[in-house]
Amino acid sequence: MRPDMNSRSLNKDSIKRYFDIQVPVTACNLRCDYCYISHHHHESAEIKPLKYSNSHIRKALSRERLGGTCLLNLCGSGETLLPLYVVDLTRELLEEGHYVMLVTNGLSTKRFKELVKQIPADLQKHLMLKISFHFMELKSKELFEKFFANIRLIEDSDISFTVELTPSDDEIPYIDEIKELCLKNLGALCHITVARDNTKPEIPILSALSRDEYISVWGQFDSPLFDFKMQIFGEPRKEECYNGLWGGYINLETGSISQCYGLRPARIFDNLSAPIDFCPVVKCKKAQCYNGHSWLTFGMIPELATPTHLEMRDRITLDGRHWVGEEMRRFLSHKLSENNEMLSSKGKWTALMRNRSNQAVYTVRRLVDYIVNGEWSVLRSKFQNFVKK
Ligand code: SF4
């Protein structure tokens, strides 16, 4: 399943693959209560240097190697814009011809200025900032002015943006204030995401409210992002998923790719002339597709009818402007099936068999590594987990 470079896949204005890219930063300049990572591990918060240069990463993720123009979503476990290399890497990936999204808490004025200054206007049109609105932290640290001034910097450029609030029960008494701030500074209400409790195996919604109460409280923002996330929340996907073939999860630190989160990684940054082995997951074993507002709206499960990703991101302001610029709007309206072939039954069966054998080889290799390195406690816990299952 090598990337095909036929003329259709080389259409620069249409998405060939979608990748979620992990940036190795756990440090953050905020301490939100609902944060999945940073505030639980202050002691390990860091900005790791990249082992690979930005130009090397660009070659590893070239349009030719990935099969065409892709959408690359760069996200750290802490604040994505803290590492020094992020702006230059973004420019490299845009110059390569990809579209890029950067997840940020919107507080790094320095990086925002660098993005506007160092990225040429025609490339800015292919960049979108996904800005998280951490209301409680901004309120307690008196950072509203800085936050909205930074967004204005972006609004005045050709870079697209979207703003989403992670809802928490603490914010409920402030809903009117949140709405007022958004309408005044953003011209529209922010989008709403769904906070999840990653400490529990079933990954429930992080709230003391019932599901119906949660929908009634946060649904008042009329956010298609919230509506779609709630529609798929808690639902294991039974359909066939093309993630792994039409995209995947890339780790910049290790230079590896997985078909989706937590699956077997394969190194792709070492030998740049080696083709990437794209193979679909087909059968998803996860409790739910918690980032389905991205994977699924681009059509990783082609048989599932979903809104477009543009609907998850854009807002039209009171005076008729879009948060998402025209070129980005066009790009985010496409589905992956427009540039990729569907697999036959035989192709899906072959992928399933390959997944099984690759996983078996990977598991044996890991076990051998643990034994050779004398990591008995890891081995014991793996064995206990296996017995529990
Ligand atoms: S259904 Fe979602 S979680 Fe499962 S493999 Fe596909 S993209 Fe990943």
Image: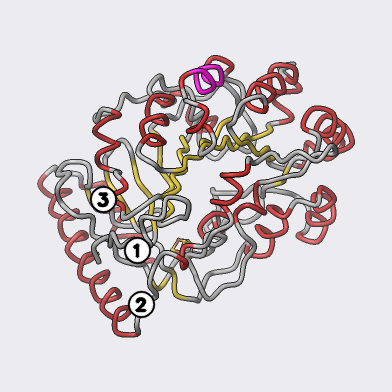
Which quadrant would the C terminus be assigned to in this image? bottom left
Query: Tag 2's secondary structure?
Result: loop
Q: Is residue 38 left or right of residue 388?
A: right
Which residue is pictured at 36% across the width and 59% down the height? 9
Q: Which residue is mark 3?
A: 65
> Outermost residue toward the bottom?
345
Q: Amino acid at mark 1?
A: Leu
Q: Residue at x 46, y 43 (%)?
A: 99
First in residue order: circle 3 vs circle 2: 3
The answer to which quarter of the image holds residue 356 is bottom left
Left or right position of 276 against 95: left
Image spot of residue 315 (x, y percent):
73, 44
The type of residue carrying mark 3 is Arg
Residue that badge 1 annotates: 245
Q: Is residue 159 left or right of residue 352?
A: right
Q: Which badge, 2 or 1, comes first in the chain's sequence?
A: 1
Q: Is 45 in the magenta?
A: no
Q: Main secondary structure of the magenta part?
A: helix
Residue 5 placement: quadrant? bottom left
For badge 2, the amino acid type reads: Leu
Taking the spot 76% from the left edge, 60% from the top edge, the residue there is 211
- Asked if residue 324 is positioned above or below residue 46 in the image, the reply reads below
**Numbered range of the magenta stretch:** 111-117
